[in-house]
Image (spheres, rainbow, N blue to C red):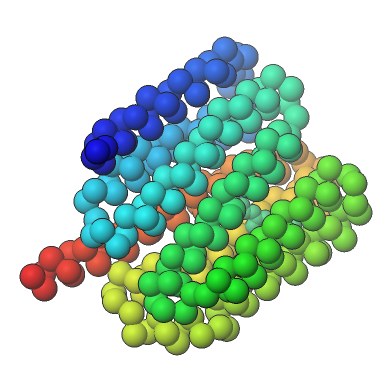
Amino acid sequence: MLNNRTLGLTVLVGLLFAGSASAETTPLSEKDMVAVSFWIATAMMFASTIFFLVERSNVAPKWRTSMTVAALVTGVAWYHYTYMRDHWVAERESPLVLRYIDWLITVPLQVAEFYLILAAIGVASAALFWRLFGASIIMLVFGFLGESGQLDAMLAWGIGVLAWAYIVYEVWAGDAKKASEKASEGTKLAFTYMTYILTFGWAIYPLGYLYGEGVFGDEDLDMLNIVYNIADVVNKTAFGMMIWYAATVDTAAAEAED
Ligand SMILES: *C/C=C(C)/C=C/C=C(C)/C=C/C1=C(C)CCCC1(C)C
């Protein structure tokens, strides 16, 4: 049987091997702030993955799956960031395809994370999961079609925003909010963080898109990438930290009861 520590170490070694695939990097210019933001995001994804895996064994068992999912989100992002940063440094061009491949995996994982929180407050259903999942895929597909120029950029943005707004509506207006009031302190916290992340954390992305389309002046791929990189750190690392914090609050409360 694998214990948590062995599991964590195995994943770490695997990640290091995967990362060495892109170890041959183009020199980094001190003027290239976008590249610097790619490097910082890469390191943060890596560090948070290790942190979530190790901390997993310090929280109550019912929170462990959430910690695992948080680690998968940052782990998958870490893997893609090692390539995205090279793509940027070598080409000075947006790693559009890599970015969307990453989101196509990490966004559904995040939806699964939301689902676990909704399940903890007792309002989750398979139908709700599929609605959130479906809306998130529509959002990403239209974002990709718009950014890659296969569809009118603003039309695609509008459809993407509608799909996102629907997700926001589901978590604010559904039964979840009311049901969460009866939940434990930690679960209540996790639910509140989730609503904030979905509303404010996810809002950073459609803003970054507008920089790329030149809505705020010239088309600005530097700002597009910096904004997306910040958004990823907020939504993946910081959200994972929030889940971890909620889990530790709940774990401490359960221990005090014993
Ligand atoms: C870890 C990656 C995450 C949480 C990515 C989230 C991405 C979004 C919330 C993207 C949203 C977009 C819209 C709301 C409008 C269309 C353009 C997108 C795809 C950037």
Q: In which quarter of the image is ligand 1?
A: bottom right
The total number of labels drawn is 0
Residue 1 located left or right of residue 156: left
Identify the residue shown where x is 26% and y is 58%.
Answer: 61
Q: Quadrant of residue 257?
A: bottom left
Residue 133: tell me if it is visible: yes
Residue 97 lies, with reference to residue 19, above or below; the image says below
> Residue 226: horizontal and vertical position, in percent?
63, 41
The quarter of the picture where residue 122 lies is bottom left
Query: Residue 127 placed where, x, y %?
Result: 60, 74
- Tell me if residue 33 can be seen: no
Quadrant in the picture for the C terminus: bottom left
Viewer-closest of 70 and 157: 70
**Up-down relation of residue 49 to residue 141 (above or below):** above
Residue at 42% from the left image edge and 85% from the top image edge:
179
In this rendered view, identify the residue nearer to me: 138 or 32.
Answer: 138
Seen at 39% across and 77% down, the residue is 121
Quarter of the image with the N terminus is: top left
Q: Residue furthest front?
A: 1
Please state the horizontal and vertical placement of residue 58, each as a whole percent of the image: 22, 51
Q: Give how far across and how far down residue 39 sits, in percent.
A: 53, 29
Q: Which residue lies furthest to the left in this view?
A: 258
User: Of 198 and 121, which appears nearest the observer?
Assistant: 121
Horizontal side of 172 relative to 161 (left or right) equals left
Residue at image coords 58%, 15%: 25
